[in-house]
Amino acid sequence: MDRLSNAVPVGEGLLTTPLSPAENVRINGSRCSECGEVMLGSYKSCANCGGESMQQIPLGKRGKVWTYTVIRHQPPGQYRGPKDPFVPFAEGLVELPEGIRVVSALDCDLEKVHIGMEVELVVYELYQNEQGQPVMAFKFKAV
Amino acid sequence: MREIVIIGAGIHRFGRFDDESYIQIGQEAARKALQDAGVAWKDIQSAYVSTQYLPSTVGPKILKPFGATGIPIMDMESACASGGSTLRQGMLSIASGAIDIALVLGVEKMPRGYMDPLQIYYPWQVDMGLSTNPSYWAMRARRHMHEYGTTEEHIAKIAFKNHKNSVHNPNAMYRKEFSMEQIQTSKLVCDPIRLLEICAPNEGAAAVVICAREAAQKYTSNPPITIAACVHTLAGYSADFRCPVDSLSAKVNNPGPTEVTSKKAYEMAGIGPQDVDCFEVQDTDAFCELEIYEQLGLCPFGEAGRLIDEGVTEIDGKHPVNMSGGLISKGEPVGASHLGQVYELVTQLRGNAGPRQVPNVRTALGQVLGASGNCAVTILKK
């Protein structure tokens, strides 16, 4: 049986469905039919113009790093990534073709991360929840 | 609108105080403000209390022991701008004519270490590890460096200046000067931001007694300080890139919250940035102060590095910034933070700041900025 058949997204409305196979999953966006702005996730109204005609769209898979940093210490709260030991990772804003920059972990060599770096979406299992369901998250990997 | 003045100010030092409850900390600042004004608690007609990390009814717990006079005592919160929004509410109640005199208090006692990220982030951002506050400041800094050639040295120079100023501020948490080398080799928190370049959450309180100008003489013999403007705004769409955003527009380029808020405040006060004698601003991290120079109109966009290079924002410079040592030295007890700035500015306007005194201060500005793009700017005039 496909082990991702009962997978859930890390945040409601963040990812397109079905969640399996993972390589077909995209980040969900909401596009305003009035002003054209695109927001991350699922929205019923537009924070830019107040319009109430929002259309769900899958965001593009390829993007470029607009800015970045490196997380060298374990983030606070219930971080679900590797903790023992914690593995430092790059974090950045990835500019996608729809005109949106998304905050994401970057899967790349920490010495080589740079502004303008080309990256591609990876949807992956972040952890298993208490019900035993795979919880799917996203990151961007250097290409 | 009625002109509103500050007639008394008080502070409880910022830092860590294991032996004091937030009630004791808050009471000390409130008592000092009342004493400074020479006003009795029973004369206060309304109280506004700013706090973010404390439980419910903080204001009543702190102030009712002074005498249960039955006046309204309200708790308020607007993230790092809490002190500004609370001061503004106090002013509005006086401006409306409903009351003549109010106490405005900011108080905080925050848990040690990182603040609980679920206070401001979505659970999925925490799960994915996107909840490190300094990482957002770091990403802003990195982009500014890319666009304008700002350097890690510029950022370190801000920390150097603020630590240096703190030595003379008895109300600061850290009062130690650090060398550029110590700053630039301190632990990397999130590239390019280092440990000696960020502020710590902590504890403290600050308070002011405000009243209608025409009523001031009735209450005090202190020379009143005019609140020429106190503006609180939230960032426009996609205008603020700091924790906790999950995305930004790549198409819309709205002005940042400090730019919008300070413009309104200058307009209200009938002045421009060049007319302000000294500033206290939100240096949550050292880079943030650089960016604020630009947003307050102290220099064109991209030129903040030059300002710190030329010493313009030193105590003896043309536009002194963070004479108190800033949040980097004082720490940031969120609810108390802006009123702490106001306390410093009142001290400067009265000429009582000792070795950190800016000569002949007649106009002074405080600015705070935090989660959800909450921003407040207050302008005081002698």
Image: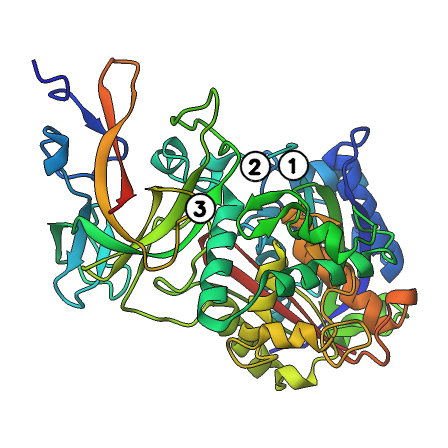
Numbered circle sitting on residue B110: 1
| Camera sees residue B282 | no
Which of the pair B90/A32 is nearer the observer? A32
Q: Nearer the viewer, mark 1 or mark 3?
A: 3
Residue B138 seen from this side: yes
**Chain of the residue that carries numbered disc 2 in the rendered image:** B
Tag 2 and tag 3, C-beta contact below 8 Å: no
Give the CA separation, mark 1 to mark 3.
Answer: 36 Å
Q: Does the residue at mark 2 contact the one at mark 1 (Cβ under 8 Å)?
A: yes
For the point 80% across and 72% down, the residue is B315
Residue at the (63%, 77%) spot, across then down: B306
Nearest to the observer: residue B368 or residue B152: B152
- Looking at numbered disc 1 in the image, what kind of residue is underneath it? Met
Residue A109 sits above or below residue B154 on the image: above
Circle 3: residue type: Glu
| Residue B339, image x, y percentages | 70, 57
Give the residue type that dot 2 points to: Met
Please state if B43 lies on the left or on the right of B97 as rendered.
right
Residue depicted at x 56% and y 37%: B115
Rendering coords of residue A17 (x, y %): 11, 35
Task: State yes or no: discs 1 and 3 in contact (Cβ < 8 Å).
Answer: no
Q: Quick one: label 2 or label 1, which is nearer the N terminus?
A: 1
Residue B252, image quadrant = bottom left
Q: Residues within 10 Å of mark 2 (few under 14, many from 20)?
A: some
Q: Nearer the viewer, mark 2 or mark 3?
A: 3
Residue B115 numbered mark, or none: 2
Spot occupied by residue A53 in the image (x, y as percentages of width and height): 13, 58
